[in-house]
Image (cartoon, grey):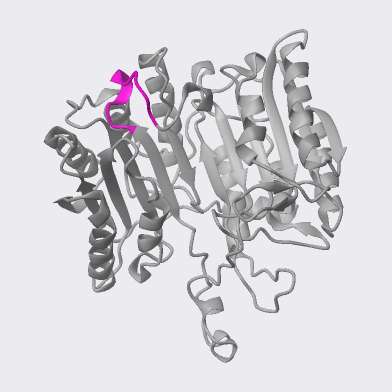
Amino acid sequence: MADAQESLGRKGKYNLLGPRVGLILSSPEISASIVTVLEGVFQTLGCESCRRRETSVQDFLGELTVFREQLDAHRGPIGCALVALVAPSGQLRQPQQLIRELSCCGALRGCPKIFLLLSSAPGAVFKPGAFFTSLCELCGHCPHWSLLQMLTEVFRRMAEESSGATYCPVLRSSLRGAVCLGDMGPWRPEPEPTPSTQYDLSGAKAALLLAVIRDRPGAQHDVKALGDLCQALGFETTLRIDPTAQAFQEELAQFRKQLDTHRGPVSCALVSLMAHGGPQGQLVGADGQVVQLEVLMQELKCCRALQGHPKIFLLQACRGGYRDAGMGRTALPWFLRWLWTAPASPLHADILQIYMDAQGSSSKGSSPERSDQEDILTVYAASEGCVAYRDEKGSDFIQTLVEVLRTDPGGDLLELLTEVNRQVCELDVLGPDCDEYHKACLEIHSSLRRRLCLQT
């Protein structure tokens, strides 16, 4: 516990000592006004140089390759990279392929890579809305805030401005520390939040833990640790062991019904799903059958009692079969590793993706996300397509999560999860049927609109 306290005391913050570089890629159908606004935003965020390219979506990958090669040829450190990808709705079908192109940039190893993925109706007249205006304002007035704190506040303002809209922005983070774009000074904690910027958790808090422990050595330790934590945080906790694929869905449906019929307000729900993962990110039940993760999550997203309240999903399962050797030491032959002083870093770490509709608050039509995506925090034990690791002592994700939350139960959950990811990324892990060390990295999805503290 002392080690965890010391670690939290030196919570990571990216240095951003080098220049901040930007790239804006837009398809020909996108209005020039969108790109103009983006250039102003990048300038406000401190970009010293920003390339602007208009090209087809099919050529985005080639442009990113050129951008990566230019950065790798750059002499001297780079602080961070900001990339905007703007295309008509539905055309950015495989953004992860584009993001991976920059994640393997040697010059950006250990530096934050920030992606803004905007969808827009062809020829639409851009209205900056609350997103850009709020982000620029917060950078000026709250320069010590981390970018995740700023985005949460921006999401809240967007929701208030666009009441009744069907769209909800979402961020995906594998950051390992605080990104403060507003200044270069030391990180300082933000002022005490006002009631309007923090979720009210004075009502009931409920947790559902569904865990397959059959043929998953060490899983029982995760169940015990997480169950004890939930009870310590005041959650009414329900535990089900070795559910079948069908039972996963039935338990979620029953949990939703109990919340909807609960006497009195429900302020927060937490669902933990622990199992083997299928090749496409499904969950494998104790009977060997698979169930789609989105089907399970949808049960809670449509819960009436949780409308406007935080919904937390913790997912300890593989999301594919890729094993990340990392960038650095573990990627070298064994006889060279002992000469390498810099620690290896996961290939998928240090990335922040922000998905939103470029028409901002004016959008009322179809969009990538729906309003039932609001107030959701999802934490994956592995990046998309990757293996999630566990041994006879439990999983690195759950065990580290429990230790960090026990150390600071009243802290901002997004910031604490970033610290969890930093600790997990520092580990060298050995998976089953593998004698080579690999790296692990969490993936955090958030559409939270307020600061979330599980204990006040």
**At 74% across and 74% down in the image, what residue appears?**
433
**At 58% across and 35% down in the image, what residue appears?**
377
Residue 22, image x, y percentages: 24, 52
- Which residue is most to the bottom? 335
- Position above or below: 325 against 450: below
- Which residue is most to the front? 289
Q: Nearer the viewer, residue 343 or 410?
A: 343
How many marks are shown on the rendered structure? 0
- Position above or below: 34 against 158: below
Based on the picture, tell me whether residue 362 belongs to the magenta stretch: yes
- Position above or below: 45 against 80: above
Based on the picture, tell me whether residue 179 belongs to the magenta stretch: no
Q: Is residue 87 left or right of residue 352?
A: left
Residue 76, image x, y percentages: 27, 71
Residue 18, image x, y percentages: 29, 61
Magenta highlight: main SS: loop
Q: Is residue 352 left or right of residue 141?
A: right
**If the image is split into quadrants, where does the C terminus sit?**
top right
Tell me which segment is drawn in magenta.
357-367
Query: On the image, which quarter does residue 79 sit in?
Result: bottom left
Residue 156 visible, this angle: yes
Query: On the image, which quarter does residue 432 sit in?
Result: bottom right
Q: Nearer the viewer, residue 276 or 454?
A: 276
Q: Nearer the viewer, residue 405 or 113?
A: 113
**At 33% across and 50% down in the image, what residue appears?**
184
- Position above or below: 349 against 190: below
Residue 399, image x, y percentages: 74, 52
Residue 233 visible, this angle: no
**At 53% across and 23% down in the image, what residue appears?**
372
